[in-house]
């Protein structure tokens, strides 16, 4: 059973930066596509960024140039660097694992709260 544990969330001012992490255990991390999602109150969960096993990345338009997803297979960890944060970046950030490579995320973490304040 794959377990994902996010960390690093917190309160940051507009324009600030934060790095959140997701540590995986119980599976073959290097063979999983990994994604970061976020959900704000009253909103649907949305994909923020993802990274494939071959390190190909995807970003939603609203975070391109500001966020960076990376992975360290030796540490079974995926990261999301959040720069130039905006109020609308606030939400609960979840990481997820896609073991089959078809963007079907089967394993989810519990989430970490990111709050951007003015």
Image: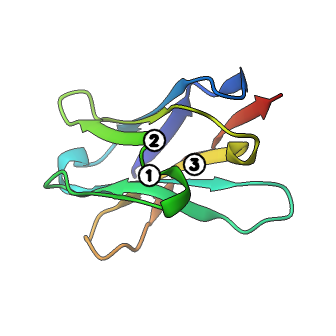
Label 2's element? strand
The Cα atoms of the two marked residues, 3 and 2, are separated by: 15 Å
* Residue 62 drawn at (x, y percent): 55, 57
Q: CA distance from mark 2 to mark 1?
A: 6 Å
Residue 3 occupies quadrant? top left
Quarter-of-image position of residue 101: bottom left
Residue located at (78% from left, 65% from top): 43
User: Quick check: marks 3 and 2 in contact, CB under 8 Å?
Assistant: no
Q: Position of residue 113 (x, y in %)?
A: 71, 36
* Color encoding of the figure: rainbow
- Looking at the rendered image, the disc whose residue lies closer to the viewer, 3 or 2, is 2
Q: Are marks 3 and 1 in contact (CB under 8 Å)?
A: no
Q: Nearer the viewer, residue 102 or 81?
A: 81
Image point (55%, 47%), residue name? 109
> Residue 116 got which mark?
none
Q: Which mark is residue 67?
A: 2
- The image quarter containing residue 93 is top right
Q: Is residue 13 visible?
A: yes
Point 20% across, 36% down: residue: 73
Quadrant where the C terminus is found in the figure: top right
Q: Are marks 2 and 1 in contact (CB under 8 Å)?
A: yes
One can see residue 25 in this view: no
Percent position of residue 78, x then y: 36, 38
Q: Is residue 110 above or below residue 62?
A: above
Q: Which residue is mark 3?
A: 94
Task: Give how far apart the Cα atoms at labels 3 and 1 are.
Answer: 18 Å
Sequence order check, earlier mark of 3 and 2: 2
Marker disc for residue 64: 1
In this image, 50 relative to 44: left or right? left
At a point 29% along the width and 64% down the height, the residue shown is 99
């Amino acid at each position: 059973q794959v377990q994902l544990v996010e960390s690093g969330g917190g309160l940051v001012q507009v324009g600030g930066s934060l790095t959140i992490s997701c540590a995986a255990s119980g599976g073959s991390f290097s063979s999983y596509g990994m994604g970061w999602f976020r959900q704000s109150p009253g909103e649907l969960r949305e994909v923020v960024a993802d990274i494939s096993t071959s390190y190909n990345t995807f970003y939603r338009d609203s975070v391109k140039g500001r966020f960076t997803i990376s992975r360290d297979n030796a540490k079974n960890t995926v990261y999301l660097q959040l720069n130039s944060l905006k109020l609308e970046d606030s939400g609960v950030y979840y990481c997820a694992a896609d073991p089959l490579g078809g963007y079907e995320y089967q394993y989810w973490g519990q989430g970490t709260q990111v709050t951007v304040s003015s």
